[in-house]
Image (cartoon, rainbow, N blue to C red):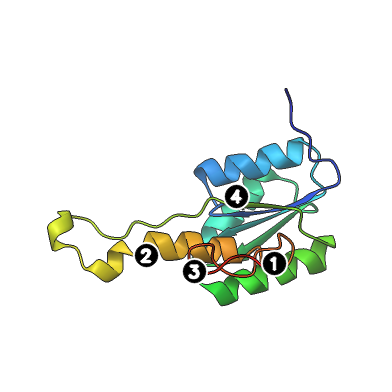
Amino acid sequence: MEARFDGKVALVTGASRGIGEAIAVELLEAGANGVTITGRKPENLDETIQRIGDSDRVLALVARADDADAADRTVAATIERFGGCDVLVNNAGTNPAAGPLTKVDLGAVDRPGRSTCAGLCCGRGPCGVRRCPSTAAPS
């Protein structure tokens, strides 16, 4: 069964390489009108745009997945460029710290959760999620 995304607009976080980039390419090949990709490093996003080669249907934005303000700006830019946002793929992740878990700062261990939460909050407008599911029910 092949999924189609004809006429849809998607936002893919953590899409400057790897799985996120592959998802963005698949969405475009499946008919998406536009795909916003995010990543932390502008040079990686530039390289991704060159590899994808469809700059009319791709918007690349520098944004950290654990920054709720960046999430808001990303959704707003997606809506401004493509007229909406139908699909959110929260692919961004973080590596909290290296080394034995017993020596890792507890604040660092919480980073992946914040990243996921901010990514989910990214869908506040178009996806209907107003707050992180772990802290409040969607309204």
- Percent from the top left, x then y, of residue 31? 81, 39
Residue that label 1 marks: 75
Point out the tag, 3 or 2, that comes first from the N-terminus. 2
The residue tagged with tag 1: helix, strand or loop? helix
In this rendering, position of residue 85 left or right of residue 64: right
Give how far apart the Cα atoms at labels 1 and 4 are: 20 Å
Q: Is residue 40 visible?
A: no
Residue that label 4 marks: 48
Residue 111, numbered label? 2
Residue 135, numbered label? 3
Query: Which of 121 and 18 lies nearest the eye of the viewer?
Result: 121
Point out the tag, 1 or 4, that comes first from the N-terminus. 4
Q: Are marks 2 and 4 in contact (CB under 8 Å)?
A: no
Give how far apart the Cα atoms at labels 3 and 4 are: 34 Å
Instruction: Please report the residue visible at 53 percent of the width from the left and 54 percent of the height from the top.
Output: 14
Q: Residues within 10 Å of mark 3 (few under 14, many from 20)?
A: few
Q: Are marks 1 and 4 in contact (CB under 8 Å)?
A: no
For marks 2 and 4, give the one nearer the viewer: 2
The residue tagged with tag 4: helix, strand or loop? helix
In this rendering, position of residue 26 left or right of residue 56: left
For marks 1 and 4, give the one nearer the viewer: 1
Give how far apart the Cα atoms at labels 2 and 4 are: 25 Å
**Considering only vertical position in the picture, is 35 above or below 62?**
above
Q: Quadrant of residue 128?
A: bottom right
Residue type at tag 4: Thr
Point out the tag, 2 or 4, that comes first from the N-terminus. 4
